[in-house]
Amino acid sequence: MNKKQKKMLIRIILAAVMLIVLHFIPADGIVRFVLYLIPYLVIGYDILRKAFRGILNKQIFDENFLMAVATIGAIAVAVTGSGDYTEAIAVMLFYQIGELFQSYAVGKSRRNITALMDIRPDYANVWRDDRLVQVDPEEVETGTVIVVQPGEKIPIDGIVEEGSSSLNTGALTGESLPRDVKEGDEVISGCINMTGVLKIRTTKEFGESTVSKILELVENSSSRKSRSENFISRFAKYYTPAVCGSAVILAVLPPLVRMLVLSASPEWGVWVYRALTFLVISCPCALVISIPLSFFAGIGGASREGILVKGSNYLEALSKARYVVFDKTGTLTQGVFQVNGVHHGSMEEEKLLEYAALAESASSHPISKSLRQAYGREPDRKRVCDVKEIGGHGVTARIDGIPVAAGNDKLMRQLNIPYKECHSAGTIVHMAVNGEYAGHIVISDVLKPNAGKAIRALKGAGVVKTVMLTGDGKKAAEQTAEELGIDEVYSELLPGDKVAKVEELLAEKPAKAKLVFVGDGINDAPVLGRADIGIAMGAMGSDAAIEAADVVLMDDDPMKIAKGIRISRKCLRIVHENIVFALGVKFLCLILGAVGIADMWLAIFADVGVMILAVLNAVRALFVRKL
């Protein structure tokens, strides 16, 4: 418990003891009123103060106002001899017990989430004046060599310059298995170094590093409210004044009817008591507290699994996902390309690979990297000039003054160069040297281990159609789709074609169904923004894709998509349970209170009891069942 909660607990105990003692002290009239007023003010002074401030700020209708009016009215009824002081004080006492319980439950869930996301590093180790000193990570510039010792968090993204170790990536990815790293490997901030000492050259500033991006996403997630949260806000805005008006009518109209129409005793005390009971029952705490808490817990539970959701509106949309569209490279495949063969070459294989590596030397695309890797050494870029990249086709360049073209069959047709079809599956890079066809290079990507399992898991989660979009050739794309069990595949697409295809799919799907696009590259950013929900790969994915996405998978595992959908549906199920339960109990008790069956004690359950049960149900969203 924090200091505020401890103080409240002391007030509750003190007021309860005083109430018990007063039960055994005989007193009447003004003495009895003053004696019972003391425990009432001990337990309720803060509620009265908040209600008074609300009136001054013209924000009258909230739970504090309802409790103040109800309990002051109950005391007034007791003064007239028609009620009991004990009831009024007990209502405030149990309301405060409920508030304390709710405060503790909410605080505990927030602490759990904070602990799950406790990845912010406190310092970075750098060499200064021949000694290792700890500095604020925000002071470390890009290109600085930092030292991470066993047990410490990696503070900033970078590349290992010296050393090898195992990293605990659980806080980022939800993956329990450690990741081994060595010299030359890229590492991201937030991971815990488990074994060896690592020297890391930073590649980003702290504000742009992975850990900062994650913390920013989680901190800002509450600002993007779901339709359910907005509904509750609008509902409370109209509901509270409506029940206050209803309570006034209940207190005034029946007595007037009895007096003027039936010529009977008005029984003001009875109907005022029923109206006060009506007010206590009507307090909307359960809804106002539990609905945002459900989404907060759902986002926290997803974060623990390495699924970062940027807002509760996206979590709600994800629960309605029925169509999932994938980019291929880096999403369903590892983005690790290998040269598997050189066919129909009119020159030596090594020379053809040299031309291909030089032509692609300025590109960071995985296919370009595989060509340079097959060449076996770093290309001399001074030999290359006039490089032109033609989107969706390939590149042209001059190498040692000789015109060279490397790309797909579209590039060959554009250059009017006859080429030979390849019957092997994979990405085909056709080569033309000095205007003549020189052969083609077959490059294959490697599927992610969980890719096929991920597609099956999506089907099990209720996804009705899976689609793959790729710039690869038709043969390679169809082979990948068949191997993974994907329903539809569209190949040889330019970046603009992917957007157009997603537009078509959005037009075809039912209005309530949501379309998810999953990608990782810079060219996927427009599609991620256009889809109902964009999911980006956070480890290998580009910054542009992560910025454009609504959900980020920290370990690039496509299995997490189905898990994210299941988490969102559990969260929405809890939200709907709380709405139905809270409103159902409220309206039933309101009717019972209006006809005189429910008293103040039932009113306390309808308010405090429902709130406690709804909060406990909301916290369940924090815990995720393993798939």
Image (tube, rainbow, N blue to C red):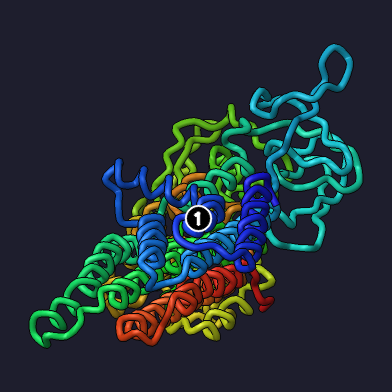
Q: Which residue is mark 1?
A: 31
* Residue at point 83%, 53% (across, down): 180
**Residue 369: percent from left, percent from top:** 63, 48
Pick the front one: 223 or 358: 223
Residue 151 position (above or below residue 504): above
Crowding near pointer 1: few (<14 within 10 Å), some, many (20+)? few
Outermost residue, right direction?
196
- The quarter holding residue 442 reads bottom right
Specify the quadrant of the image occupied by residue 75: bottom left
Vertical placement of residue 622 versus 404, above or below: below
Does residue 589 appear anywhere in the picture?
yes
Q: Quadrant of the C terminus?
A: bottom right
User: Residue at 61% of width from left, 78% of height from top?
Assistant: 452
At which x and y percent is residue 342?
63, 60
User: Which quadrant of the figure has residue 456?
Assistant: bottom right
Residue at the (91%, 47%) spot, across then down? 195
Residue 383, compared with residue 604, is above or below; it is above
Can residue 354 be seen here? The reply is no
Q: Amino acid at mark 1?
A: Val
Residue sitting at x 61%, y 30%: 205
Q: Is residue 579 left or right of residue 626?
A: left
**Residue placed most toward the observer, 479 or 69:** 69
Name the spot of residue 381 as percent of width and height, x first: 59, 31
> In the visual, does 396 lie left or right of 165?
left
Q: Residue furthest toward the left?
A: 261
Q: How many marks?
A: 1
Is 123 placed left or right of 463 in the picture?
right
Viewer-nearest residue: 573 or 28: 28
Out of 290 and 172, give the one closest to the viewer. 290
Callout 1: SS: helix
